[in-house]
Image (tube, helix red, strand yellow):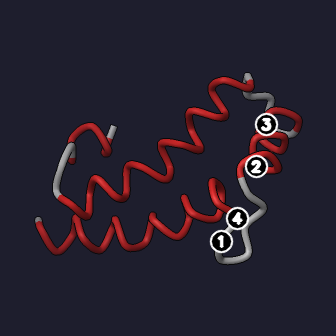
Amino acid sequence: PAIARLALGAIMLPHGAQHALGMFGGYGFSATRTWMTDTLGFPAPLAALAIVIELIAPILLIVGLGGRVAAA
């Protein structure tokens, strides 16, 4: 389970960094939120929450805290 947790966290962290921080060729927080609201039709607060969770959940998985919460 620890190896799976670390592998998933290592895969998901760059994805969250793309959306939230604009790293690894991503567009950053505002552009991603605009895309989610305009293209996907998400409400702006939920889009912002999703972007933040995409960044925080992999960190929690790697550290070993909140695995069940991050999986939800």
Q: For mark 4, give the secondary structure.
A: loop
> Circles 3 and 4: CB distance less than 8 Å?
no
Q: In this figure, which residue is indicated by the disc labeled 1? A: 23
Where residue 21 appears, as percent x and y from the top left, is: 64, 60
Q: In this figure, which residue is indicated by the disc labeled 2? A: 32
Where residue 16 appears, as percent x and y from the top left, is: 54, 58
Q: Is residue 46 above or below residue 19?
A: above
Amino acid type, callout 2: Thr
Depth-wise, is mark 3 or mark 4 nearer the camera? Answer: 4
Q: Closer to the camera, 2 or 30?
A: 30
On the rendered image, what quadrant is the C terminus found in? top left
Q: For mark 1, give the secondary structure.
A: loop
> Circles 1 and 4: CB distance less than 8 Å?
yes
Badge number at residue 65: none
Where residue 62 appears, as percent x and y from the top left, is: 26, 64
Crowding at label 2, few (<14), some or many (≥20) Cα neighbours within 10 Å? Answer: many
Badge number at residue 22: 4
Q: Earlier in the sequence, mark 3 or mark 4?
A: 4
Cα gap from disc 3 to disc 2, whole angstroms = 11 Å
Q: Is residue 62 above or below residue 36?
A: below
Q: Closer to the camera, 44 or 71?
A: 44
Q: In this figure, which residue is indicated by the disc labeled 3? A: 40
Cα gap from disc 1 to disc 3, whole angstroms = 22 Å
> Residue placed at 56% from the left, 65% from the top?
15
Amino acid type, callout 4: Gly
Amino acid type, callout 3: Leu
Cα gap from disc 3 to disc 4, whole angstroms = 19 Å
> Circles 3 and 2: CB distance less than 8 Å?
no
Crowding at label 3, few (<14), some or many (≥20) Cα neighbours within 10 Å? Answer: few
